[in-house]
Image (spheres, rainbow, N blue to C red):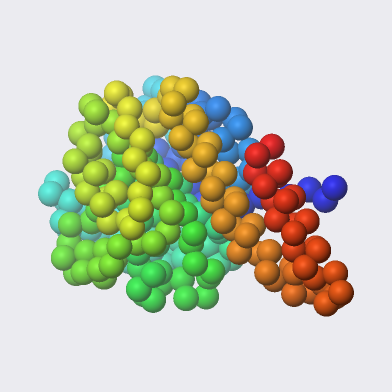
Amino acid sequence: MEQEKKLKVLCLHGFRTSGGFLKKQISKWHPSILQQFDTVFPDGQFPAGGKSDIEGIFPPPYFEWFQFDKDFTEYTNLDECIAYLCDYMVKNGPFDGLLGFSQGATLSALLIGYQAQGKVLNDHPPIKFMVSVSGSKFRDPSICDVAYKDPIKAKSVHFIGEKDWLKVPSEELASAFADPLIIRHPQGHTVPRLDEASVKQLSEWSASILEDLKNADAPKASNSESSVDKDNVGVQSAENLREQVAA
């Protein structure tokens, strides 16, 4: 049987860390969760402008996507960052989904919200889903009035830590999505280790995305079949999709 094409996911790291560090953070999750996704971990455009919280834990270099003030209402290099990521996605994609931690999650939601409003990524297929770990909304009204103008329809899962200093902002970000799945954990500002219940939730969420995308592609496939076999092939394809998702 022809091997299934994996869904491509752009993974954006947190402030003053790196793509390599996010890859290590995600590796604590059960491998079955992400085995059907092709994950890409780029580094931020700008070198870290100060001390990193992971010094002594993970080797440099460290990067940041943009800079901000203490109230997170003013941003430096944000437009450059957005332009860089949009260019990266067009050249290295297309990407089916985004995954982000902290600053990376905040950026991911912004890109999806902006794309839904026609502000960016008009030459890239719609982003279909997002995984947010400790994300938040931007606070500049000129950004909020566009990115979060309407409920974001992309499927989303939001990991929110009980001890995370971004717990409330993470909840606010989840509320910007039409039908968010919220997975709570007892830890702080980190990519959490998942208990059995969380693994089940995330696995079922991932399976639902795969099934939705396959079902969306099924009519295209059936249209290419001959009219004689069309109905029969459609039934077989649907049965195969269910078997593949369940496997």
Which quadrant of the structure image shows residue 111? bottom left
Q: Is residue 34 left or right of residue 175?
A: right
The image position of residue 100, as x and y in percent, is 41, 45
Residue occupying the point 85% across, 69% down:
229
- Picture layout, residue 227 above or below residue 107: below
Compared with 143, 6 (above or below) is above
Residue 142, placed above or below residue 72: below
Q: How many marks?
A: 0
Quarter of the image with the C terminus in it:
top right
Q: Residue at x 61, y 64 (%)?
A: 216
Picture coordinates of residue 31, whole percent (x, y): 60, 30
Report the side of 101 relative to 96 (left or right).
left
Residue that extends furthest to the left in the rendered view of this protein: 71
Can residue 80 be seen? no
> In this view of the protein, which residue sits in the foreground, 26 or 22?
26
Between 139 and 43, which is closer to the camera in this rendering?
Answer: 139
Which residue appears at 55% of the width and 27% of the height? 30
Which percent across, then down, holds residue 191? 39, 31
Q: Is residue 137 left or right of residue 114?
A: left
Horizontally, is 143 left or right of 94 in the view?
left
Q: Quadrant of residue 152?
A: bottom left
Residue 94: image location, x then y, percent = 59, 63
Residue 170 visible here:
yes
The residue shown at (78%, 48%) is: 3
Please tell me which residue lies in front, 38 or 60: 38
